[in-house]
Image (cartoon, helix red, strand yellow):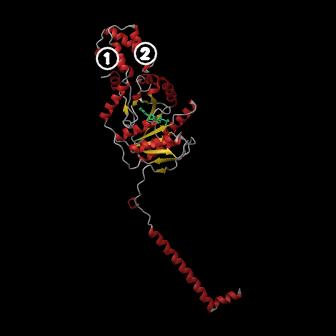
Amino acid sequence: MDAVLSLLQSPVGIALAVLVAVAVLALVVWGVRRGRAGRDEAPLPRREEEAPERPPRAPEESIPAEPAPAVDEGVPASPTVAQAGAGAVEAPESVPSRMQRLRARLAGAGTIGATLLGVLSRADLQAADWEEIEDTLLMADLGVPATERLMGALRTRVKVEGTRDPQAVRQILAEELLALVDPAMDRALHLDPAPGGDARVRPATVLMVGVNGTGKTTTAGKLARVLVAEGKSVLLGAADTFRAAAADQLATWGARVGVDVVRADREGADPASVAFDAVREGAERGIDVVIVDTAGRLQTKTALMDELGKVKRVIEKQVPVSEVLLVLDATTGQNGLRQAEVFAQAADVTGIVLTKLDGSAKGGIVVSVQRELGVPVKLVGLGEGPDDLSPFDPHDFVNAIIGE
Ligand SMILES: Nc1nc2c(ncn2[C@@H]2O[C@H](COP(=O)(O)OP(=O)(O)OP(=O)(O)O)[C@@H](O)[C@H]2O)c(=O)[nH]1
């Protein structure tokens, strides 16, 4: 210790101490300069307009959505948003030409009217003729109660009015069919804020339910297109997580109509989680309408009810569900109707979409499904094309069936 002290007091020791102090000071100055230089190279933008432009996202690129806030139903959050991209978006067909084409297709499929008019115009209607009328109505899936009611009305009016004139008979048939279809039902899609209601309650939400293969995904895409054409902003939610192809199919529709799709990042994810995130994303972006597609295949009625119920509840944590659309394949007739009842019990259905009417001569299903489920047919699908979806108009429908 004494040796060290005497070294420090010596001229050599003092020179060494000065050298060490200078070296430490030089290091400190160098460090400070380096820090400043680093900040100068990459200045942080303070205001938004200073932010560097982000490169545009490639079409179909998927970006992970932010994790959803915990949903107390144990919903895992792992969806992604498939961007529609800036690719060419098809313009929808104009409404008049679409309606004309749809009518032509429906008329081509419906032979009910031609058969009925042919029989009703016969000179003297016998029991066999009335049986033929009854068979035609039943074959057209009108259902037993509606067939009986229509038969009763036709018998009475043809007898009382005593006419065989084809025009008059046609008029009677049109009036009676129209009464069965019930033009007084509210068939509008309620997607706008209620008059005087809170306009901030956005987005409006549409839940698509129904048996697999009925056309839910296709209808979701077609509906998105119709709404976009009306000037609404739309987001699709692929809550059919049962098979990855369903989400891909929806993403294809999204790209086609210029609408983003929120989807799970893996097959078999919780549908409620995707539905939740789609609506949350829609709310954050100020979207007008979020359409949520669901799966139709589940082992048991209870499992189906549980799943649909959960999807609906999870959406309602954020906004009310505006429309629950039950998609029904017109070609499946009374059988499809039985399955539809299960869905109607599971979710409070507000409207029916009757698809594949183009491939069915069974237009009577419109009447039976409304009677059985007590819910109006709001939309009809008349083909696989993007413009083959139309609002259901009772007058057009009856005219198409029996010919104008
Ligand atoms: N002819 C005709 N075909 C339709 C119509 N709507 C849907 N389709 C076809 O029906 C098939 C099934 O449609 P999807 O939309 O996949 O049915 P889905 O209910 O979503 O089926 P899952 O995803 O299995 O639950 C597809 O080939 C559609 O193109 C329609 O109105 N007319």
Return the residue nearer the eye: 129 or 207: 129
Residue in view at x 42 percent, y 43 percent: 254
Q: Which residue is mark 1?
A: 170
The N terminus appears in which quarter of the rendering?
Answer: bottom right
Residue in view at x 33 percent, y 19 percent: 174
Q: Which mark is residue 135?
A: 2
Return the residue nearer the eye: 120 or 18: 120
Where's residue 148, x and y in %? 43, 14
Which quadrant holds residue 307? top right
In the rendered view, would you say 269 is above or below 115? below
For label 2, the SS is: helix
For label 1, the SS is: helix
State the separation of the CA atoms marked 1 and 2.
Answer: 19 Å
Where's residue 116, x and y in %? 36, 16
In the rendered view, would you say 135 is above or below 219? above
Residue in view at x 62 percent, y 92 percent: 11
Q: Please indicate whether residue 242 sits to the left or right of residue 392 in the image.
A: right
Is there any visible trace of residue 207 in the rendered image? no
- Mark 1 is surrounded, within 10 Å at the Cα level, by few (under 14), some (14 to 19) or many (20 or more) other residues, namely many
